[in-house]
Image (cartoon, rainbow, N blue to C red):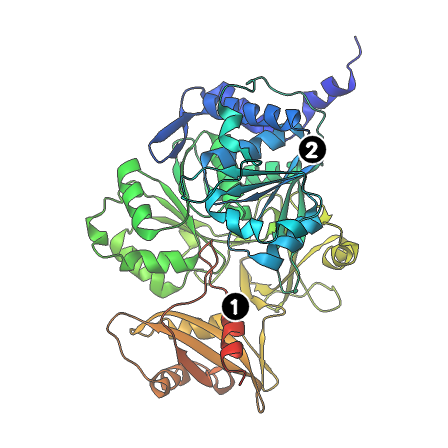
Amino acid sequence: MKMNELQENLLRRATIGDLIKRSAEKFGNRIALLSGGEKVSFRTFNEKSCQAANAFLELGVKKGDRVAFFTHNCLNYIYCRMGLAKIGAVPVPLNFMLRGAEITFIINDSEPKMLLVEDALIPEVLAVKESLSGVEQFGWFDFKNSVEKQQEWLDIDSFFSGKYPTTEPEVLIHSDDMATLMYTTGTESFPKGVVTSHLAYYMSMMHLSCDCNFRDDDTIIIDIPMFHIAGTTILLGAMTFGAKAIIEYAPDPMVTLKRTASDKITMWVYPPTLYQALPTVPGIESFDLSSLRKCISFGAVLQPVILEKWKKLKPDIEWRNYWGQTESSPLGTTSIPQDFESKINSIGLPDTTITLKVFDENDQELPTGKVGELVMRGPSIMINYWKNEEKTDETLAGGWLHTGDLGYIDEDGYVYFVDRKKDMIKSGGENVSSQEVEGVLLRHEKIAQVAVIGLPDDYWIEAVSAFVMLNPGADATEDELISYCKQDLAGYKVPKKVRFVDSFPMSANGKLLKRKLKDNYLQAHSN
């Protein structure tokens, strides 16, 4: 008997919604998610996702429709994301730190049918609600915050009250259909919507196993936000491989240490700023971190001074530097633990399924050791930028993802990140890597954290400028730190200005926001 179109589709497709169904069949009552005091099995995880899928279908959401989310991490958010995957609809996760015009731009650009909002963030949406064209239905996640709920909005808890069935929806979804629409700011003034396919995420799962050692006996904390490609990918990895995921509202060093001790967490995935902050938690030595065996640092390489602190605290950790982008879902490069120290300044080797090269300004491949733009190709690369053909053509020119990152490859095939192509400091006609200067300053015993940027200057055009946060109780002067840098840096790389700060602007993911730092400084000194 000849297969119908749906049967043929179900026979061999690779879609996210099928991942949790298969994990439920394989792992059953094993615990998949922990949030607060709630434990959720793989079977229940899939059933809740099916309830969400059927709720969306009844509310008129169909394949290809977008549904936007404006919330921190929670279980209902996860069920809704997976429910949309089961019906071929597309989640649009917004950074929960966005406000006003930022929200308006993304909503009006992505044109979602629904917008689901954390209760505490309802006032932010109400302030711009009249400008959000095209949103047919609003809903809210109940975090028990004392904010007036909107009676005409959906209470997402109702999706899981028993009204909607736990049966699998059967929808025709292709592996190269759009799975997510995530917005990334990059270096332009307006965010770009990255269109990622279901197949791209499947390639990410293959990579997590081959390059990051995800295993079914892992317990992974997911407190970095799921509006970020990293948070989404980690969740899918834990779900696919049968690992246990601890879901937290947002990163908190004290919570991380407590949950690692109590729940025997085996893996952390954080930017270097959090690995830098965790050892400063008072009494860290009293926390039982014996279960922790794997740490991934993304967003920037882990500085040697930070590694040395961790070697004293927990010398048996498998360390990996990780580099990737939303546009690559987020494959790129990953370090090998056994080579981590000998290649600590490297961002690793190309990930499984990724081909990576270094191009010059004319898209010609550069030889070993020469700095140019890192470009890559593979089945995890984005489909396009949403409604932005010009930028898509520019970024994917010649059949390569042009990352906008500068780097080089050494004789052993290891890749090194030098700086953002558009964020490189151009001082006195010379290119200066902010990361190189930061690496020198971080070796100073008085410095806790540092960010180096270029500031406008009449003579230098861009003056290398260091913003420094000192260790508690420490005292230092601008001249002292400039003299320190002169010991290890060429004159043109030495900061011309040092400014002392008490804190840095950070993303919800724990990454230092250099552009925000620069904008704040220029605004404060505009007069």
Residue 388 % position (x, y)? 75, 54
Q: From the viewer's perspective, is 506 left or right of 129?
A: left
Expressed as whole percent of the image width and height from the top left, the position of residue 148 reads 47, 43
Q: Residue furthest bottom?
A: 459
Q: Is residue 326 above or below residue 60?
A: below
The answer to which of marks 1 and 2 sits earlier in the sequence is: 2
Residue linked to disc 2: 175
**Within the image, what quadrant is residue 380 found in?**
top right
Are the two marked residues, 1 and 2, in contact with CB atoms closer than 8 angstroms?
A: no
Q: Residue at x 62, y 59 (%)?
A: 101
Label 2 sits on a secondary structure element that is: loop
Discs 1/2, front? 1
Tell me if residue 161 comes above or below residue 191 in the rendering.
above
- Image coordinates for residue 81, horizontal then vertical, percent: 56, 35
Q: Residues within 10 Å of mark 2 (few under 14, many from 20)?
A: some
Which residue occupies 70% across, 36% down? Answer: 65
The residue that appears at 33% across and 52% down in the rendered structure is 253
Q: Nearer the viewer, residue 448 or 157?
A: 157
**What's under tag 1, amino acid-wise?**
Lys
Residue 411 appears at what percent x and percent y? 55, 62
From the viewer's side, name the closer residue of 161 and 416.
161
Q: Amino acid at mark 2?
A: Ser
Structural crowding at the residue carrying mark 1, measured as other residues with C-alpha within 10 Å and reported as few (<14), some (14–19) or many (≥20) = some
Q: Could you tell whether 43 is left or right of 332 in the image? A: left
Identify the residue position indicated by label 1 in the image. Answer: 516
Residue 516 shows up from this direction: yes
Looking at the rendered structure, the secondary structure element under dot 1 is helix
Q: Nearer the viewer, residue 264 or 510?
A: 510
